[in-house]
């Protein structure tokens, strides 16, 4: 039996380990190499090699010695260098584009919003490009775009977005051609869940749900620290769950669904409906 590991598998394993080490420093840093090895069940030698590579790339730096009361050599603590690069986050809605420029630690440096008269892919791409030009942010290291709709596994193609009127739109590739840098596309609620996992209330929790109420009802599902998207990318389409088959319906929501009952347009309509508590004087 061939016991050798194919080069591709070794490279994939190394990339995964690098990501896990980086994420561990982000979540728990400042942290020693020994703690990283114990937490991730990696050998101390592997962590030493991986951290050296990440330091050489500027992603990590040696912050300080651990403050301990023991004797012997003190451990050197690692931290993420969040100032290494700027990134851009874009929110696309049916009526506007919102852009935030941040460092790698999500510290916001600048924001801007631009109204959309219509949502064709060409209009959205040009709007994002001109916004980044006006914000002097064409040199960002990467661009993340979030929007309402199901996104394919390639992280670049919108399979279906009823609110934007898109189907099979390679928006990531269109933006890369316009801007020249790497672009990642994500469903807006999944992007919120990822933000909470990395920088918010979900930090340090492997499993949690992020529920949103707005024009629709969305659900971000995080399992084992990763967003669960389902086989077709629509696992978080929570708003289509039917609660009351005899309930109301809207232009974008099925009869009796969560969105028809709880969205920001549905709640005022229900409050004004005759016979409902609180309807008087609404």
Image (spheres, helix red, strand yellow):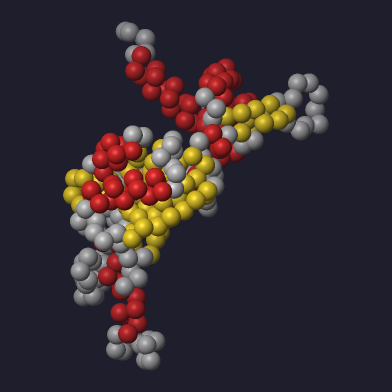
Quadrant, the N terminus: top left
Whether residue 62 is visible, yes or no, is yes
In percent of width and height, residue 165 lies at: 20, 56
Q: Please name whichever residue, 105 or 103, is drawn nearer the observer in this view of the structure.
A: 103
* Total labels drawn: 0
In percent of width and height, residue 150 lies at: 26, 49
Quadrant, the C terminus: bottom left
Q: Please name whichever residue, 71 or 178, is drawn nearer the observer in this view of the structure.
A: 178
Image: 55 above or below 224: above
Q: Please name whichever residue, 258 or 142, is drawn nearer the observer in this view of the structure.
A: 142
Residue at 24 percent of width and 56 percent of height: 119
Residue at 35 percent of width and 48 percent of height: 130
Residue at 21 percent of width and 53 percent of height: 120
Image: 222 above or below 84: below
In percent of width and height, residue 93 lies at: 32, 58
Image: 178 above or below 57: below
In percent of width and height, residue 170 lies at: 23, 41
Whether residue 154 is visible, yes or no, is no
Given the current orientation, which residue lies at the most extreme bottom position? 281
Given the current orientation, which residue lies at the most extreme top position? 1
Given the current orientation, which residue lies at the most extreme left position? 167
Q: Is residue 29 found left or right of 259 in the rendered image?
A: right
Q: Is residue 71 found left or right of 176 in the rendered image?
A: right
Residue at 24 percent of width and 75 percent of height: 247
């Amino acid at each position: 039996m061939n016991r050798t590991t194919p080069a591709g598998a070794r490279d994939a394993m190394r990339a995964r380990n690098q990501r896990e080490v980086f994420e561990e420093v982000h979540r728990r840093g400042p942290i020693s190499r020994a703690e990283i090895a114990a937490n991730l069940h990696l050998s101390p030698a592997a962590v030493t090699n991986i951290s050296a590579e990440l330091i050489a790339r500027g992603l990590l730096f040696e912050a300080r010695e651990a403050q301990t009361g023991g004797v012997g050599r003190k451990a050197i603590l690692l931290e993420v260098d969040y100032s290494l690069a700027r990134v851009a986050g874009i929110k696309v809605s049916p009526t506007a584009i919102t852009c935030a420029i941040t460092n790698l630690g999500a510290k916001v440096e600048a924001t801007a919003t631009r109204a959309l008269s219509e949502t064709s892919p060409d209009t959205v791409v040009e709007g994002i490009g001109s916004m980044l030009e006006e914000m002097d942010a064409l040199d960002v290291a990467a661009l993340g775009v979030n929007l309402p709709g199901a996104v394919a596994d390639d992280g670049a193609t919108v399979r279906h977005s009823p609110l934007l009127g898109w189907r099979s739109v390679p928006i990531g590739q269109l933006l890369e051609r316009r801007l020249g840098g790497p672009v990642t596309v994500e469903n807006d609620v999944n992007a919120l869940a990822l933000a909470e996992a990395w920088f918010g209330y979900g930090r340090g929790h492997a499993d949690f749900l992020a529920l949103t109420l707005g024009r629709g009802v969305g659900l971000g599902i995080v399992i084992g620290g990763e967003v669960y998207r389902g086989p077709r990318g629509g696992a978080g389409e929570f708003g289509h769950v039917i609660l009351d088959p005899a309930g109301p319906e809207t232009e974008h929501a099925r009869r009796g669904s969560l969105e028809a009952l709880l969205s920001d347009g549905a709640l005022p309509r229900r409050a004004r409906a005759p016979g409902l508590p609180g309807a008087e004087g609404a």
